[in-house]
């Protein structure tokens, strides 16, 4: 029995300092019955400690799932009477870090819910929590998200700046992130130089700005932070390299065509190419069109066109 108690204390260690009295398996859920410690509680009105019990009440809250099943905690809490003369106030004791006032989830479950809705918000957050055996509607997920306090303003040293479309070709915005922690700092309306310049002047401690190739952002950074170092971000470098390579290949398409038209010496591939050339020209001599040739021979239309243009003396030039 001692081992069982130790296991219960280990699994539900996040409920400390509640005193766990019973753990019941009810199939789809696990019910934990507990009580608050018998220590003195502080009156929320005058701050005086009290141990005078006025009565008992039961709170039912949800806790983090165990073994893919919901956990319900039923806690017997005391309603205490304030001993201060003239206060005459009764209050229900709270357990900071475990049970918060007016909440129907334990503090540790509330932290997990906040982490999910902060990343996925409404419907997506609700679906993921349902897979984790936490019942939460999309409306409650949004309300939980709106109750999360915003981070206090900080002065980043390295930032990343880029634009994104709110409505493509109509509305754009500028996102600013902390390049060291990868956290979003702010979102600015529009993507003009004046908007970014005004924001940068309010944050003079920035030393490095990572941006795309936009001349608009470059000018705003030069005007607001003339001593800041501007660097290009890796994604845009790879994108520009890919576009430059593709443009170079297209510019030398005639050279590639000459190489592809070089004859193949011999071998099975050359024999196959020659047979296809005769098949294509045999159909063309019968008055069959290029598209019909491609359909009958199960070749691409451009491949058939190359065979049709090939010199009979170099019938092995085209390649499928």
Image (cartoon, rainbow, N blue to C red):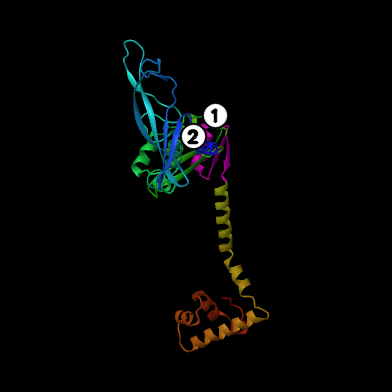
Q: Quadrant of residue 267?
A: bottom right
Q: Position of residue 88 (x, y in %)?
A: 31, 15
Q: Earlier in the sequence, mark 1 or mark 2?
A: 2
The count of marks equals: 2
Apparent side of residue 229 relative to residue 108 in the rendered image (left or right): right
Seen at 57% across and 51% down, the residue is 238
Coordinates of residue 206 in the picture (x, y in percent): 55, 32
Badge 1 element: loop
Instruction: Depth check: give the residue in front, 1 or 11.
Output: 1
Local SS, label 2? helix
Q: Which residue is mark 2?
A: 14
Q: Is residue 130 visible?
A: yes
Q: Nearer the viewer, residue 277 or 252?
A: 277
User: Residue lying farthest bottom?
Assistant: 286
Q: Which residue is disc 1 drawn over? A: 205
Q: Is residue 62 magenta?
A: no
Quarter in which the C terminus is drawn: bottom right
Against 269, is 116 above or below?
above
Can residue 190 be seen by looking at this rendering? no
Say if the magenta span includes residue 219: yes
- Residue 117 vertical placement versus 35 (above, below): below
Number of residues whose C-alpha sits closer than 10 Å to that of mark 2, classed few (under 14), some (14–19) or many (20 or more): some
Range of residues picked out in magenta: 208-233
Left or right side of 85 for 16: right
Residue 231 position, x and y percent, is 58, 41
- Residue drawn 51% across the image and 32% down it: 224
Q: CA distance from mark 1 to mark 2?
A: 41 Å
Query: Viewer-nearest of labels 1 and 2?
Result: 2
Binning the other alpha carbons within 10 Å of mark 1 as few (below 14), some (14 to 19) or many (20 upward) gives some
The image shows residue 79, relative to residue 124, as above or below, that is: above
């Amino acid at each position: 029995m001692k081992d069982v108690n130790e296991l219960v204390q280990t699994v539900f260690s996040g409920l400390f300092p509640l005193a766990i009295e019973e753990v019941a398996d009810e199939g789809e859920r696990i019910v934990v019955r507990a009580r608050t410690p018998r220590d003195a509680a502080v009156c929320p009105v005058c701050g005086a400690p009290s141990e005078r019990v006025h009565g008992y009440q039961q709170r039912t809250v949800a806790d983090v799932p165990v073994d893919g099943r919901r956990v319900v905690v039923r806690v017997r809490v005391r309603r205490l009477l304030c001993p201060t003369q003239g206060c005459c106030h009764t209050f229900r004791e709270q357990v900071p870090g475990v049970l918060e006032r007016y909440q129907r989830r334990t503090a540790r479950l509330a932290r997990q819910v906040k982490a999910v809705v902060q990343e996925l918000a409404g419907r997506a957050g609700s679906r993921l929590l349902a897979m984790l055996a936490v019942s939460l509607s999309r409306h409650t997920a949004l309300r939980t998200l709106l109750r999360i306090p915003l981070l206090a303003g900080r002065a980043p040293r390295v930032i990343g700046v880029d634009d994104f479309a709110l409505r493509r070709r109509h509305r754009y915005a500028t996102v600013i992130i902390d390049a060291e922690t990868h956290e979003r700092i702010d979102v600015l309306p529009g993507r003009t130089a004046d908007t970014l310049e005004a924001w940068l002047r309010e944050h003079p401690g920035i030393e490095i700005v990572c941006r795309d190739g936009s001349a608009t952002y470059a000018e705003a950074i030069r005007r607001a932070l003339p001593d800041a170092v501007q660097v290009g971000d890796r994604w845009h470098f790879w994108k520009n390299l890919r576009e430059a390579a593709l443009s170079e290949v297209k510019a030398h398409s005639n050279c590639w065509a000459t190489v592809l038209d070089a004859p193949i010496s011999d071998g099975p591939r050359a024999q196959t190419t020659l047979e296809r050339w005769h098949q294509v020209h045999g159909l063309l001599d019968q008055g069959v069109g290029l598209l019909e040739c491609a359909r009958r021979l199960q070749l691409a239309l451009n491949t058939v066109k190359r065979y049709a243009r090939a010199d009979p003396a170099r019938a092995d030039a085209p390649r499928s």
